[in-house]
Amino acid sequence: MDRAGRDGIAPRVTLVRGYHPLTPVPEAALQASLTARLAVVLDTASPDHDTLHFPAEVFLSLLAAATDTVTHDAVEVQADAENRYDNLDPFAAHLRAAAEDERLPPLRVLILHRRQLVIMEETEFWAFCGGPAPYGDSFTASFYTEPATAERLEQAIAAACARLRISIDARIQGADRPVPTWRRRLAGILPGRLGPSRPRSD
């Protein structure tokens, strides 16, 4: 059995293409014209854990798949407000050295080529506050890319899930563009009125 199997696989994964009213869109992604969003919703419930569980090995596999998607010459991992890594390997070592119940995803990961941002991963920590469907109590890895890269990234993410024997429960289509700020604020005041779209049947 591989390390991912021992570490615990997220029992459910959902893919979200596009945006929902409460999507926290990073300004850096917009400035770099990375307007295509693919969110990987990692459920934190696990039959082997009494509290929320972060599937670290799954998350690392997703990051590796993203880096394989594009030509790049630098990766920056912003683990938290104090710790940053200039490569995925030291970040992975940091995660694996931590006690399982103390592991957390990074704030964001920047994948660059010639100092230009080509993919940005921004983690949404819905597990700490609860989010609208389909996010719920999840750690969601939101990947921002150029539209031309979006399909290739989704294929790489799906292949990574297949290698880990993780089934993708649903693929949901959101809005193609970020929801205006005023609508995001209204969605927070009136939950359910501007909720996410229904799962798309492929």
Image (cartoon, rainbow, N blue to C red):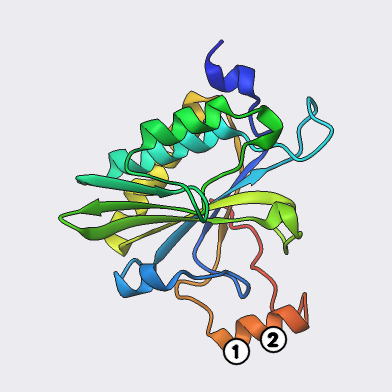
Question: Residue at horizontal 58%, vertical 30%?
Answer: 166
Which amino acid type corresponds to the residue marked 2 in the rendered image?
Leu
Location of residue 167 by image quarter: top right
Q: Residue at x 32, y 43 (%)?
A: 86
Compared to 159, does 125 lie above or below? below
12 sits to left or right of 17: right
Where, by quadrant of the figure, is residue 13 drawn? top right
> Distance from label 2 to label 1 (Cα)?
6 Å
From this view, report whether residue 178 is shown above or below residue 84: below
Q: Are marks 2 and 1 in contact (CB under 8 Å)?
A: yes
Residue 83 placement (x, y as % from top left): 47, 47
As helix, strand or loop, the secondary structure at mark 1 comes to: helix
Q: Which residue is label 2 attached to?
A: 186
Residue at coordinates 55% horizontally, 25% vertically from top-left?
97
Q: Position of residue 160 (x, y in %)?
A: 45, 32
Judge left or right: residue 144 versus residue 102: left
Near mark 2 (Cα within 10 A), the count class, few <14, some 14-19 or many ≥20, is some
The local secondary structure at tag 2 comes to helix
Q: Nearer the viewer, residue 11 or 181?
A: 181
Q: Closer to the camera, 154 or 139? A: 139
**Disc 1 residue type?**
Trp
Question: Quick one: which residue is furthest to the right in this view?
Answer: 50
Q: Position of residue 122 (x, y in %)?
A: 48, 57
Q: Which residue is mark 1?
A: 182
State the residue lying farthest toward the left. 114
Whether residue 35 is visible, yes or no, is no
Q: Is residue 138 left or right of residue 95?
A: right
Mark sitting on residue 160:
none
